[in-house]
Image (cartoon, grey):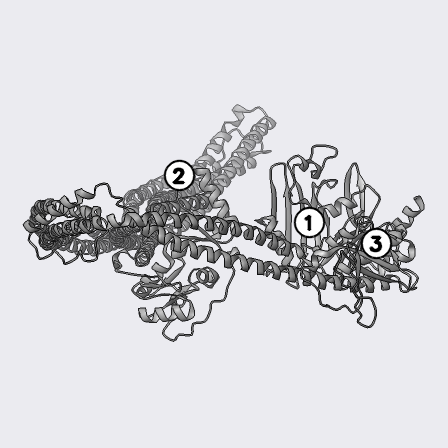
Amino acid sequence: MYIKEINITGFKSYKDITTIRDLSPKHNVVIGRNGSGKSNFFAAIQFVLSSEFTSITQHNRHAFLHESVGAKSATAKVEIVFDNMDHRIPTENEEVRIVRALTMKNDTYYIDGKSVTKTEIVNMMESAGFSRSNPYYIVKQGKITELATASDAYRLKLIKEVAGTRVFDEKKEESTKILTETQGKIEKSVTLLGYINERLKKLEEEKEDLKEYQKWDKMKRSIEYTIFDKEINEAKAKLEKLTDQRTKINTEQNTYETSLIEIKMKIQNTEKHIRELDTHYKAKREEKETLVNEQAELMERKTHLDLSIKDLKAEYDNERNGKEAAKQEKQDIEQAIAERQAQLNELQPRYQRLLEEESSKDSDIRILDQRCKELYAKQGHLDKFRTVAERDKHLNAEIQWIDGQIIEMDNQIKEIEKSIKADENEKETLAQRLREEKHILNDLSIKMHNLSQEIKQKKEQLNRAITRRMDDSHSEKEKREKLTTLQYEVNRMEEDFRRLTPKATMNGITSIKTILEEYRDKRIFPEVVNGYYGRLIDLFTCAPEFNKAIEVTAESRLFYHVVENDDVAMKLLEAVNERSLPGEFNFYPLKRILDTQPREIVDQEARPLIECMRFDQKFNQVFKMVFKDHVLVPRLDVGTRVARNEAFNCVTLDGDQISHRGPMTGGYMDVKRSKLDLIRKLKEAENDKNDLEKEIDRLTERISQNLNGVDQIRLEISKCETQIQTLNQSYHNCMAKKQITSELINKLSNNAEPKKAQITKLNNRLKELTAQKVSVRNQIEKPLAAGLTQEERDKINKMEDDIKKGKDALEKISKDRADLENRIQTINNELQHKLFKKREHLNAVIESFDAGEKLNRLDAQQSEIRLINVRVNKLLEFVGGLDKNIEEYSIKKAALTGALEELQDEQKKAEKSLEDFAKNAEIFCTKIANLQSKREEYSRKIKEIGPLPADAHGTYDKLPLKQLDKRLTEAMNHLKKYENVNKKACEQFIQAASQKDDLAKRVNELQKNEQAIKDLLTVLENRRYETLHLTFKQVAKYFSEVFRKLIPNGSANLVMQTLEKSLSTRSTTTLSHSTTLQSGAETETTIGEQPSMPERVLHDLETFVGTSIKVSFTGGTETRDITSLSGGQKTLVALALIFAIQKCDPAPFYLFDEIDAALDQEHRRAIAEMIHDLSQTAQFITTTFRAELLEHAEKFYGVRVRDKVSYIDEIAKASAFDFVQDDQAHT
């Protein structure tokens, strides 16, 4: 054991926390300049450990509080940390912290954080080896000088303190005080004894008259006693009779009361069952209404679907029939179109040929006509033109005009051909568009079909989801009904538990629960929430048969709160106080409870009660603390045996207890009032309730998910229907576009023929113009002729004939062509405006009929009806079950109502009977009260009679009351003669004689006690002498040894100074003894290396007056007294004596404050060597200004001061030497 660490805060010159760590268990040196705070450092240690500062007055506390720059410290606090690895301090901790905190109002000590008293600190330190009688484990400045210059008497007093004679002195003082008190009591008792003897003589004279008086008084009292006793016996007999009758009535009354209680319990249970039935019925009725409404909705939906299916079937049939008719009609139309196209194919070549012939013929006629006109014009050229040039000019102009016409005609042909080609390209484009539109229509039809299938699947999913939701809703309602019933049971059990638990305890439980719920909700103080484990009753389980035993053993501790540590408990209590919550609070902090090992049980019929319990091993120490000394036994005799032999507290399964101290408790215990059984049932009910709540939450979540799923499916169905509508609209739009495209293609086809005919006409006209141009060109440069030649006239005639014939032929061709054109036009009109349009319409009708879509819709609606039928059947099944439950409810309620009425009738009858019993009981009570009053009155009179004679019982019992009254009168008349007699003379005589005997015994006991105290004083004196003698020998021996070690050539002895009697032993190797008697003169007793105990006279201790010191520094035979030594020599002798005392009464550590100040270098080195040797077994903390003590030290600490604040730091050995050398240089 040694000082490991010192923490100083606000103490004297130390302001902020100053920590001296890792002190060596051997030698530690503290250095520093004067005034730096070294002495305050030593004072801090004394402040905690020394008795010097035990009591500090209010006025003197200012001196210990730090005061420098700034505010004064409010608290002076010093903490000393001991290394307790050797467990010298009796505790399991390997480190012990002792703290003293001083304020102007408080002075507090702590051990490991726990508040203690100064006495506890002193006792602990004494148990660790610190002796209160040895003040030299702390040696301050001046202590050595004080000892060196001390008187012989002071040194004797010091040795007495080391020897512990103070204890003997205190005991002697106490015994002397008792002896004085005893002697005073003896003196008083002897005086009182003389007074009693005189009183006895006087009472002897009055005793004779008293005897006669007593004779008649005894007779009187005996007769009175007999009369009163007879009256009492008579009253007792009547009371017994009445009591028997009353007991009989009470028994009957108790039977009726028990019956009434049972009837009331049955009524409560019946009413409870009726309420539960009503609640159940109400829920079932509401559920039935919900199901019936849902059934009605489903039937309405089914009716709607039936009508829709009917309409859909009719529409499907109509459209299918229409499609078939359209197909048939289309075949007819296709046939007609084929026929008309065949006719066109047949007529078109003829028409084309006739058209070409007509055009050619007309062109030929016009050419001929033009030639004729040219010839006729040639005939008139001479009249019209004067010269050939003028004519040629005119002809050239005409040729130019013809060329213009030719170019224009040619351009028209090109434009028409270009238009025909554009029409062909557009027709091809429209044909491609028509194919694309057909493909789009096909895609739209497929998409609509797929969407119809998807809608069908979605509706099936929707119906399945609705069915699941209906099943889950039904399950949820059933579970909620169970939860309501279970919640009622939980509330009832909680109420029962609240009734069985003390109000303060229950309020405490509720308050803790409120605080924890608040912390959980706010998510604060998780260490408190996690550090609270619950009540003790909540932390274990056991078989039901052990309930009674555990309850009577633990009692109220079952409701103690188990927490992690003190902090959790304190925070909960602070929260309770802040909120002013009521209740009683008891905590088991796990960190504060030691895990003790329970004793083993020898008896085979007993077993530890803790083995009957199951709990988490983290709470093992709590249950050990509560149940470690309690065992379970099968019978009371076993429990008595175990309690007597093994000192265990025993308990039976019935709850009977046998304490190892002797008392036995037990009796009947109502099983219904078992808290453990109630807690077990409450836990089971709460677990069932939690499971139901989780199941309901799961069902609610699933219902919510189903609702979301139903909404999602309906949304998807709506989206699909919207898409179908969009696609259907697109389909119709595409159909319209397709029809328009077909019409455009037909229109383009019809426009091609007229354009080709126009090209033919333009080509013929171009041919005419070319011929005309050739004819006009031929006339150029020919001479002007006065008329036509014969040849030209013949040509004209011939051409005119040809023209006439041509016209006839042309007329016939034109007529044939016109007829054929009319026929073609009629056929084309019929095709374009009737047959093609009709075919397009029929195609649209055929394509617009989507059998798959209608069948899908029909199938989906039929599937929905099937699912509705399933759901309706399930609803009917549920409703049927509910009807059955409601019918059963009606039967059960009728039965319960009938039973309730019967129970209420029984209750009225029982209450009427109890009223009658109460009236009879009141009458009996009145009679019994009267008889008891009478009996008490006579008993009082018997007590007033006083002490009875020995023959009072039985002497007059057989006499009748009249004769007893007569004798009583006679005795009263005789007693009147002795009215003035001292009626207490005999009693006083007896009392005085008794007092005399008691007093004589008391005097004898006091005299024995006086002798015993004197013997004790003698023993104390002897032991005191022996102890002092032994201590003196040990100190003298160690003093000589230490001095020789310090001064190798020197010697030293301690000499005991006495008055007359002397005991002297010289410091020699052989035992010698000499005694010199001097009247009134002092003699010397020297005890050296081999002391002995010679014979002595009693109380030799009283002759010791001092202890002197004889030393020699040179080793010669001549010795000198300490008073004749120099200052340094005195210091060395004083240190030798201190080391001798320390070796005689060793301590775990020593504090030396500049003990080498007055020594020279050689002696300082010797002291340093001595401390080094002693530091192998004890810790030394020293201060010095010299280098010798630094040589063998292990730790060095420097003290410095700045602004009146001291600081301590660990320094190196070299730094310590530098400081010492520097200090010596300055001094």
**Marks 1 and 2 in Cβ contact (< 8 Å):** no
Q: Which mark is residue 50?
A: 1
**Residue at the image point whose x is 60% and y is 58% from the top:** 1017
Q: Is 1137 in front, or is 155?
A: 155
Label 2 Cα neighbours within 10 Å, binned few <14 / some 14-19 / many ≥20 = many
Q: Which residue is mark 2?
A: 803
Residue type for callout 1: Ser
Q: Hey, what amino acid is under mark 2?
A: Ile
Residue at horizontal 65%, vertical 36%?
74
Amino acid type, label 3: Ala
Q: Position of residue 600 (x, y in %)?
A: 45, 71
The answer to whether one can see residue 315 in this image is no
Q: Secondary structure at mark 2?
A: helix
**Distance from the alpha carbon under mark 3 to that under mark 2:** 155 Å
Return the residue at label 3: 1212
Quadrant of the rendered structure where residue 800 is?
top left
Q: Are marks 3 and 2 in contact (CB under 8 Å)?
A: no
